[in-house]
Amino acid sequence: MRNILSARVRNKHILFRADYNVPIKNGTVTNDKRIRATIPTLKKLLARGATLVIASHLGRPEGKKRAEFSLAPVARRLEKLLGKKVEFLPDCTGSAIERAVATSKNRIILLENLRFHPEEEHNDAHFAKQLARLANIYCNDAFGVSHRAHASVHAITRHLPSFAGPLLLNEITMLSALKKPKRPFIAVLGGAKVSDKIQLIEQLSKKADAVLIGGAMMFTFLAAAGNETGTSKTEKDYVPLARKLLRTKKIIIPPDVVLDNKKTVSVHALPKNRAGLDIGPETRELYSAIIARAKTVFWNGPLGLFEKKPFDAGTLAIARAIAHGKKVSIIGGGDSVAAIEKLGLAKKFTHLSTGGGAALEFIEGKTLPGIAALHKNKPKRADKRA
């Protein structure tokens, strides 16, 4: 893969695929972290004489133009962060957009939401060709969508010299550290469903020295170990698979849980009319002690009902345990990152991944279409130093 910062970009239009899928409320961006992350690269490319045509998606408008999914608030926020005029265009393809890009006196242009067109998610060749008409060079700096075979991350690379952006390259470098981790390597997995993470659990049970289980999915494993789970969320169809994973001796399950009435009980004494909503204090101590010996930790998903006190205690305790001491610590998943930021511990972690599903698929060993497309895009004689 070629790095966009090594490309010759003076007087070139760059179609810059960003991930500006950010929360918006009443027309205002409420968390601009993803926008801020792109600013250093945008400034470097502008300083080198490039014109930036930025493309992104926002939410799931299902192929229709819907005002609540417009990127207009993102344009306003981007303009403020860059301190430069950002021209926002009302669409992302078509002759009017091509003319607007070609004649614009602005060097920063933000296109409207790619997903207003169903062709984007269908990886449509014609749609990709239309996007390609807006630029001389393509850059993918949106790792978080690179597991999708969408037109703006996959088909587009057939039409333009294609480069990787620094954020995408950094995600790959950091997540690749888990392929040959310093040991002991401990994985901490939470979240609601075993079914959502089955391949991840299987992969990590092979790679890690131990996999610590929490979140609602712990009850599927507790059921597999022969425990009563009360009214807790339990995926009965996945109990046999959980039982098989427990036989690896790598999976560690909680000895106690906090119930919906805020009482702590042993997992062997969970009442039939109650649900567990967090790992208990004994589990917090056990998991923290295992993490203390680790040289590498990967964490994905909350350990309990993190949004509601006191069921955030397990997640916060694990965040503190991972932050303590010198270790490679890689965090994937919005709720895990939210816990770390809530405690002001972000700087204590090696890497907070913004990759979401793409990060999990990368760790599972899957081929990401957007990354594969960049590898296949070989320089032609004419664009060797594009």
Image (tube, helix red, strand yellow):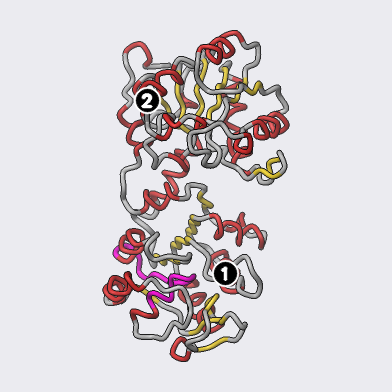
Q: Is residue 190 magenta?
A: no
Residue density around tag 2, few if under 14, some if 14–19, many if 20 or more, within 10 Å: many
Tell me residue 297's x, y (percent). Answer: 45, 63
Decide: is 100 above or below 113: above
**Which residue corresponds to mark 2?**
157
Task: Left or right? Give the position of 108 relative to 163.
Answer: right
Q: Nearer the viewer, residue 65 or 175?
A: 65
Query: Residue 87 — which label?
Result: none
Query: Given the image, on which type of amino acid does mark 2 rest?
Result: Thr
Decide: is 351 above or below 47: below
Tell me residue 244's x, y (percent). Answer: 26, 73
Give the magenta-colored segment's residue range.
206-221
Disc on the earlier residue, 2 or 1: 2
Query: Given the image, on which type of amino acid does mark 1 rest?
Result: Leu
Could you tell me which residue is drawn at 53 percent across and 28 percent down?
55
Looking at the rendering, which quadrant does residue 296 occupy? Answer: bottom left
**Which residue corresponds to mark 1?**
305
Q: Nearer the viewer, residue 382 or 300?
A: 300
Could you tell me which residue is drawn at 73 percent across and 27 percent down?
83
Label 2 close to label 1 by CB (< 8 Å): no
Secondary structure of the residue carrying tag 1 is loop
Could you tell me which residue is drawn at 50 percent across and 23 percent down?
15
Point out the residue furthest to the bottom here. 269
Q: Is residue 217 magenta?
A: yes
Looking at the rendering, which quadrant does residue 320 occupy? Answer: bottom right
Task: Left or right? Give the position of 121 relative to 345.
Answer: left
Inter-mark Cα distance, 2 to 1? 41 Å
Pick the quarter of the image with the C terminus.
Answer: top left
Tell me residue 251's x, y (percent). Answer: 36, 73
